[in-house]
Amino acid sequence: MKYSIIFFYILLVFNCNTTINNGFKIKIDSTNSKIAIGDEISVSVNSTKNKTIDSIHYYLNGKKINNQILLSNIKVGESEAKVNIFSGAEKITLIKKFDIYSNSEPKIKKYKIINEYAHDQNAYTQGLEFYDNFIYESTGLNGKSSIRKVNYKDGTVINKVDLDYKYFGEGLTIINDKIYQLTWKSKIGFIYDLKLNNIGTFNYNKSVEGWGLCNDGNVIYKSDGTSRIWILNPDTLEEVDFIDVMTDKSRIKNINELEYINGKIYANTYQFNRDVVIVIDPLTGIVESVINFSGIKDRVQQTPEVDVMNGIAEKDGKIFVTGKNWDKIFEVEIISQN
């Protein structure tokens, strides 16, 4: 049975994304100005040269679909609609990429300081994680980068290994009794045992740079300074998947230091030009809440080297935060914004 070249849609169209190729046009329509979780979209094809279409196969992110689909149980961020068009002896493939946004605003939260602990003011903190009652910390800047084991109660550095001058240290995480540390632009990471002996290296795959790391006990999450968080196999360190970090209004770029807490990813970011932490659903990429840490940097000793908040760690359900060249680590409680 022949299909009509022009498809008509049930949906009232407010949003339209169109790609034209080889005399055919693919269009994505939805009822909202921004396509969001829960929306119904319609994928259509027509010919700009009056060619007959014998059949069309529709796909969303590699999965075959009908030309209309409800966006549920799907990640936010970049999605790909693909159609295979069969016209006589021809097979034409068209691809259209588009963003899917969250369907709800992030909740705004604030903090309450519970305790303060000493922190090395010369540490340009890039990664922070508890393991066996000690803090393991990665620091940055060329010539000052290191990995260290710290007694968090008094700030004493128990063990410290400096990186070569050419490396700018970034995030770290610990899984299966191994420590993984990123570098910024060198596209190489280091692997250590718990005594900080270097036991290997790994290379980045598709990710742009090295920024933050965390893990959920099964996989490693890696930020690269974009809006993307990569999911790594801890055995091969291959980047096997990713999430895009999105709100209901935009994608959130400059995702930095990470920590996995109670099933969510907590992330520092430069996006808002102030000290905030965003809380991300690792399954979808949706920003569920934003924690406003305004004023916390004012509580550290002010020197020319003091920089932004960067460093999140969790221990026994307690959350600890610090920043670059801060002389304190703060134990905080996260509470709802009144």
Image (tube, rainbow, N blue to C red):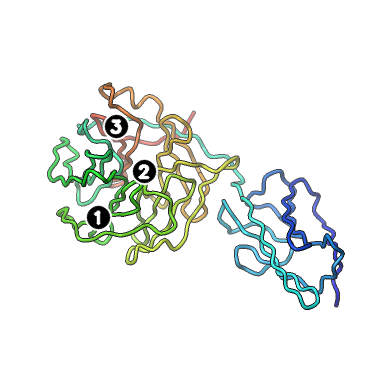
5 left or right of 199?
right
- Which quadrant of the structure image shows residue 270? top left
Residue nearest the viewer, comparing 267 with 110: 267
Residue holding disc 1: 179
Residue 144: image location, x then y, percent:
22, 38
Quadrant of the drawing holding the N terminus: bottom right
Secondary structure under the numbered disc 2 in the rendered image: strand
Secondary structure under the numbered disc 1 in the rendered image: strand
Residue holding disc 3: 114
Classify 133 as above or below 80.
Answer: above
Q: Earlier in the sequence, mark 1 or mark 2?
A: 1
How far apart are the two marked residues, 3 and 1, measured between alpha carbons? 29 Å
Q: Nearer the viewer, mark 3 or mark 1?
A: 1
Secondary structure under the numbered disc 3 in the rendered image: strand
Type of amino acid under label 3 = Ile
- Which quadrant of the structure image shows residue 230? bottom left
**Is the residue marked by circle 3 packed among few (<14), some (14-19), or many (20+) residues within 10 Å?**
few
Residue holding disc 2: 257
Residue at 49 percent of width and 42 percent of height: 253
How far apart are the two marked residues, 3 and 2, measured between alpha carbons? 22 Å
Classify 3 as above or below 180.
Answer: below
Residue 203: image location, x then y, percent:
34, 59
Residue 304: image location, x then y, percent:
28, 22
Type of amino acid under label 2 = Glu
Q: Earlier in the sequence, mark 3 or mark 2?
A: 3
Q: Nearer the viewer, mark 3 or mark 2?
A: 2
**Is the residue marked by circle 1 packed among few (<14), some (14-19), or many (20+) residues within 10 Å?**
many
Q: Which mark is residue 41?
A: none
Residue at 29 percent of width and 35 percent of height: 331
